[in-house]
Amino acid sequence: MKPQKKGPWQTVGTTPKYKNPWLSVREDKVIRPDGKDGIFGVVTMLPGVTVLPIDDDGNVYITKEYKYAIERETIELVSGGFEPDEDRLDAARRELKEETGLEAKEIIELGFIDPFTTAVNCPNYMFLARGLTQGKADPEGTEVIEVLKVPYQQALDWVQDCTITHGASVVTVLKAGKYIK
């Protein structure tokens, strides 16, 4: 491999280490900014979406679900990965319907975050959903989800007291405040 310049780093080789439908791990041989040889591990995950649904009374719909990797239940917003060739707005609508049964007349894009910039490449796009209609949820076979309906202020409090720790959920709740009176 011909060395590739990446900012102050140079990549001189790359070795795939692991891959499944949701993520891949590679190890790059690099020349560090200080000129020394090194290695750098990179995890690449499917891009994701996070959605904060809010009703006309100022209540938000939040999920409670056991998360295998951190070995505990979490309270967070509707979140999930893109399907192959799926638009991020379509992914947001699909995840909202799958996890809560809700459909939204209006979805406002709130931007994106890079959840862990040191070693993980996984942009997450954030949305606020309004004009809600309740339907039937259709969670994936890996999901056992309880939907909580709480006032927006409760979600803000949960962000402050670390009841909500999912990074994209925290940022989405905070960014949504601009649109919520």
Image (cartoon, rainbow, N blue to C red):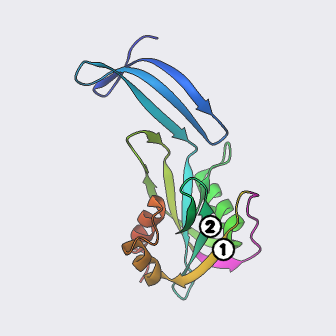
Q: Is residue 33 left or right of residue 38?
A: left
Q: Residue furthest front?
A: 71
Q: Residue furthest top?
A: 2
Residue 33: x and y in percent read 25, 25
Q: Which image quadrant for residue 110?
A: bottom left
Q: Residue at x 64, y 72 (%)?
A: 104
Question: Please, is residue 46 above or below residue 88 in the view?
Answer: above
Badge 1 density bin: few <14, some 14–19, many ≥20, Cα 10 Å: some
Question: Please, is residue 25 above or below residue 70 in the view?
Answer: above
Badge 2 density bin: few <14, some 14–19, many ≥20, Cα 10 Å: some
For numbered disc 1, what is the local secondary structure?
strand
Q: Residue at x 44, y 23 (%)?
A: 28
Q: Residue furthest bottom?
A: 57
Residue 57: x and y in percent read 54, 89
Give the spatial CA distance, label 1 vs label 2.
Answer: 7 Å
Span highlighted in magenta in the image? 130-141
Which amino acid, by three-letter code, is at mark 1? Glu
Q: Residue furthest left?
A: 34
Q: Earlier in the sequence, mark 1 or mark 2?
A: 2
Whether the residues at callouts 1 and 2 have beta carbons within 8 Å, the answer is yes
Which amino acid, by three-letter code, is at mark 2? Glu
Q: Which residue is identified by label 2?
A: 65
Q: Which residue is identified by label 1?
A: 146
| Residue 162 seen in render | yes
Q: Is residue 8 left or right of residue 136?
A: left
Q: Which image quadrant for residue 165?
A: bottom left
Q: How many marks?
A: 2
Q: Residue at x 35, y 22 (%)?
A: 38
